[in-house]
Image (spheres, helix red, strand yellow):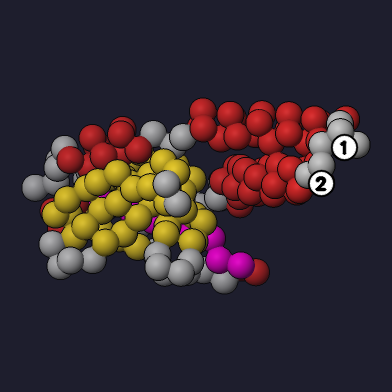
Amino acid sequence: MKNYRYVALVLATVGIIISTLYNDLLPNGQFLMGICIGVLFVILAQALTNRWLNRNIKLDDLASNEEILLEEGSTNFSAFQAKSGKLFLTNKRLSFHSAGLFGKSNPPIDIKRSAIKKTAIYNRALLPTGFQVETKEGTTYAFAADDREKWIKMLEKNTSK
């Protein structure tokens, strides 16, 4: 997914430059510039959120025999909202901790690995976004991940006993 963001970033920047230089020649130059700036804003906002806001989120409640296998800045997607935070995979659970606004903390999402029924690729608006997890109770969670194949592979290796 990182490569996808870089391509979109380059295309948005090139679109802004072209629409600025050839504004008189392009009948819809301002429209093109608006779309490019919108794409650029979304990419930069996501990058800043993942890099700066989520860097202080830590998984502090590890059990004595629990170890972190993967961690990444991520987004949890539900029906009508997306929460930015950090996703952790341990040998016992999948845990998502979100950074709330104005110091407010949101309750974490903790899914025991033994409770995971299935994992699948997750696309949002036809774009490769991440992966989703379905629990044995029927609840589905979707998370953004840069290397979703790696997360799915690690999740499917159920190391918890």
Residue at the spot 48% in from the left edge and 66% down from the top edge: 81
Q: What element carries label 2?
A: helix
- Residue marked by disc 1: 23
Taking the image as drawn, is residue 58 in sight? no
- What's the magenta region? 93-101
Picture coordinates of residue 95 (x, y %)?
34, 54
86 with respect to 133 (left or right): right
- Residue 22: quadrant of the picture: top right
Residue type pointed to by label 1? Asn
Mark 1 and mark 2 in contact (Cβ < 8 Å)? yes
Residue at the spot 78% in from the left edge and 44% down from the top edge: 28
Marks 2 and 1, Cα distance to the nearest angstrom? Answer: 7 Å
Furthest-left residue in this view:
161
Residue type pointed to by label 2? Gln
- Residue marked by disc 2: 30
73 with respect to 11 (left or right): left
Foreground: 105 or 61? 105
Picture coordinates of residue 56 (x, y %)?
56, 50
Specify which label sits upstream in the sequence, 2 or 1: 1
